[in-house]
Image (cartoon, grey):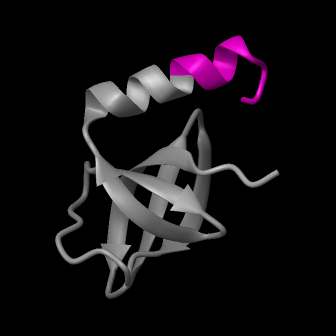
Amino acid sequence: MCLAVPMKVKEIKEDMGEVEVGGVTREVGLMLLDDVEVGDWVIIHAGIAISKLDEKQAEETLKLFKEVGII
């Protein structure tokens, strides 16, 4: 099963970014998105940000993940 996870952008360096959720940080590719800024929430799949979402959507998704034991 594949899972895409909402993560918050903490730092951007060219087309790469450092993202974080729940104290876990990862370096991911941002090359598929044009207007990502520090503080944005993005959906990460296979190490690549595939879309942006607002904070409310991110929090709702993370809450559901926690309820079913995914994170």
Q: Quadrant of residue 64?
A: top right
Taking depth in this image into account, of 11 and 41 the one nearest to the observer is: 41
Image spot of residue 28 (x, y percent): 53, 71
Q: Is residue 18 above or below residue 15?
A: above
Image spot of residue 49 (x, y percent): 45, 66
Which region is colored magenta? 63-71
Residue occupying the point 78% across, 20% down: 69
Q: Is residue 6 above or below residue 67?
A: below
Which quadrant of the rendered structure holds the C terminus?
Answer: top right
Image spot of residue 44 (x, y percent): 53, 58
Q: Is residue 58 above or below residue 43?
A: above
Q: Quadrant of residue 17?
A: bottom left
User: In the drawing, does residue 50 fall left or right of residue 25?
Assistant: left
Image spot of residue 37 (x, y percent): 20, 62
User: In the drawing, does residue 68 fall left or right of residue 29?
Assistant: right
Specify whether residue 45 is painted magenta: no
Taking depth in this image into account, of 64 and 17 the one nearest to the observer is: 64
